[in-house]
Image (cartoon, grey):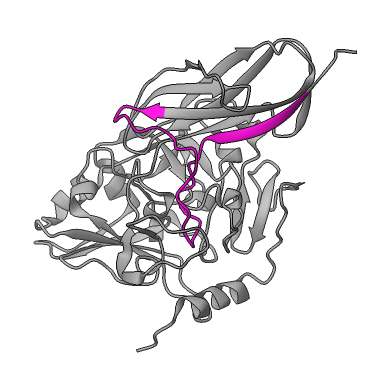
Amino acid sequence: MLTLNRREILAALATATAARLMRGGEDEPPAILGKRPMILHNDLPEDLETPVRYFGTWLTPTDSFFVRQHLPRPRPIESAAFRLTVNGMVAKPLELTLEDLRRLPQYTVPAVIECTGNGRAFYSPKVPGIQWGRGAIGNAEWKGPRVSDVLKLAGASSAAYVEIDGADSGVAKTPDFVRSLPMTKALHPATLLALEMNGGPLPDLHGAPVRLIVPGWDGTSSVKWVVRLSITDIRNNGFFMNPGYRFPKYNLPPGTPAKPDELEVIEGMPVKSSITAPEDQSKVALGPIAIRGFAWAGEEAIERVEVSTDGGSKWREAELSAPKLPFAWRLWRLNWQPSDPGYYTILSRATDSAGRVQPIVARWNPSGYLYNAIDRIGVIVEKAS
């Protein structure tokens, strides 16, 4: 059996994405039809970040929703040819068509999908990987049958895990992208096999014809192009479960490696807010200024967002949008009237329904995952001409 270490995996991924183009924050023309100009990190496979100026609505439009792919996209699957295999510890193995899935009760769940490495560019010291800023995140409405209904059809046992495989496959020495989901989360009524996104057909870039949606958990859990669900008592131990997408149990001194036996699988996401306007290092005219952003908290709901315009000396509570839901974000706004021209540091911090508060400093880790420090931008206020 071929065994690869982390260095070899990353080298193989680099080979598979030789055409990738890193752009710190510069917009590029869309590489794919159906997308607005995005921040291009890789073009094969596509890794596209949403510019913060696109974040102005509760639902992120599909044409500006970020894209994260580990492997090249599979060839589009014709609707008539699609089959979802449900096997493993089941009473009745199944091969379901799209029509079979559409005949099941359909549910709509608003939920954030966030790349586990969103915000990686802000860690210090720097860590390898795609240097995502604030835009590897989006809030969408997902519609499709519940995973629990599909498992019920197959007579799934009370096993510990559901293993999920997509139609994408590894190239060169890269492994297949396979994830395991605890049965308790798979049976949650909000966990879906999405067939639609924001009221329209699920696009190929976002996992058509069928994508798993695991609300409140890291985006890696929401496997695209799903073609197999296997019921098992053993968690998959492939690269994308171990060592990939694990987080240290204990705080690490920045710049130090983690011990493999002290890493655990990432599941629910932390509380977080981001500032979307004004943009960082922008110039604004002296006068009333609307500070805006969004906040979310994994499986919890956002309770409060506070904003400081003086580097953290004083805080004011921002106005929050409705609805207040778990899994989805809330938009926030604070009207600010600076007294003088000059340079200002603006901060935002969120508190969720479990009482978690966004920290001043994110927990450093060698993979750059789960960045959620208090957001911070600088703006230059100029006298009105």
**Quadrant in which residue 380 is drawn:** top right
Q: Position of residue 344 (x, y in %)?
A: 70, 25
Q: Note whether residue 24 is visible.
A: yes
- Tell me: residue 66, above or below residue 96: above
Q: Which quadrant is home to the C terminus?
A: top right
Is 273 left, or right, of 128 in this rendering?
left
What is the residue that sits farthest to the right in this orientation? 385
Q: Nearer the viewer, residue 210 or 242?
A: 242
Q: Position of residue 101 (x, y in %)?
A: 29, 47
**Quadrant in which residue 192 is drawn:** top left
What is the residue that sits farthest to the bottom in this orientation? 1
Q: Which quadrant is home to the N terminus?
A: bottom left
Q: Position of residue 161 (x, y in %)?
A: 20, 59
Q: Nearer the viewer, residue 217 or 340?
A: 340
Q: Note whether residue 82 is visible.
A: no
Provide the residue span drawn in magenta.
351-380
